[in-house]
Image: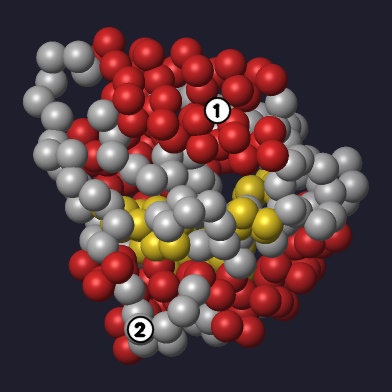
Amino acid sequence: MTEEAKNNEGRALIIIPTYNERENVVKMHDALRSLYPSIGLLFIDDNSPDGTGAVVDELCANDNLTHAIHREGKLGLGTAYIAGFRWALERDYEFIFEMDCDFSHDPKYVADFLHVAGSADLVLGSRYTSGISVINWPLRRVLLSVFATMYVKIITGLPANDATGGFKCFRRKVLEAIDMDNIRSNGYSFQIELTYYAWLKGFKIREVPIIFYERSNGISKMNKKIVYEAVFMVWRLLFAHLFEKKPQKQSFYEPELLPKREI
């Protein structure tokens, strides 16, 4: 890990929503803690029927840098992250992550995010900076994801190589500048909406290449409702901000900012 990443680690919080992740939550906690001993972890559990919440409480009892929010039911990915953002902003965290619990996001990349975040306001984990870096997805899922990013770019102008990814690191000023009450999405389109608002406000956005792995345990939360929400949300963003001046459409990917190692 670079000095930049080490300096940022103690000021960072990783928010991890969970729903029926009992098989993964301890493994994810231990993997992150072994790599980043001083990073904060916040699990947000939506009353998982499989008992994930109780497992998280055990982790919190034995690790004072691990925290939990328990919600009354399955209320959606977007509202989970918003709850986590608000919790983080009430405290002194400077770097605030979104991350999945199912190991589709490899913990090793957190170091790259922390390094790049030293000179950026929002860092996106991208599966498509150079080709397609996805493992064990069916072709239809890959095509859906690639098409979604093209769709977002054409309609809104957002120049992201991966607009729908959920592995991100925000500086706190980005989240402070976004009106959380105005966020309408609750599925994966939540990721598009947040990045779009950060871009619209002129924050410096950069992409870090990642390899995305299909989950090996549990069940994917993707469904038709989530897809439809994203399709219509993009048009809502376009018309709501049609006459606003957009930032320059420069690339978010600058390889020279990355630490000197292979992904």
Question: Tag on residue 260?
Answer: 2
Numbered disc 2: secondary structure:
loop
Residue 220, given in percent of the width and then of the height, sits at 76, 40
Looking at the image, which is closer to me, 144 or 221? Answer: 144
> Would residue 107 be found to the left or right of residue 178 on screen?
right
Q: Amino acid at mark 1?
A: Asn
Looking at the image, which is closer to me, 149 or 53? Answer: 149
Of label 1 and label 2, which has the lower sequence position? 1
Q: Amino acid at mark 2?
A: Lys
Q: Which residue is mark 1?
A: 186
Q: Is residue 165 above or below residue 109?
A: above
Q: Quadrant of residue 169?
A: bottom left
Question: Tag on residue 42?
Answer: none
Neighbor class of circle 2 (other Cα within 10 Å; few <14, some 14-19, many 20+) is few
Q: Is residue 198 above or below residue 260?
A: above
Residue at the (18%, 46%) spot, across then down: 250
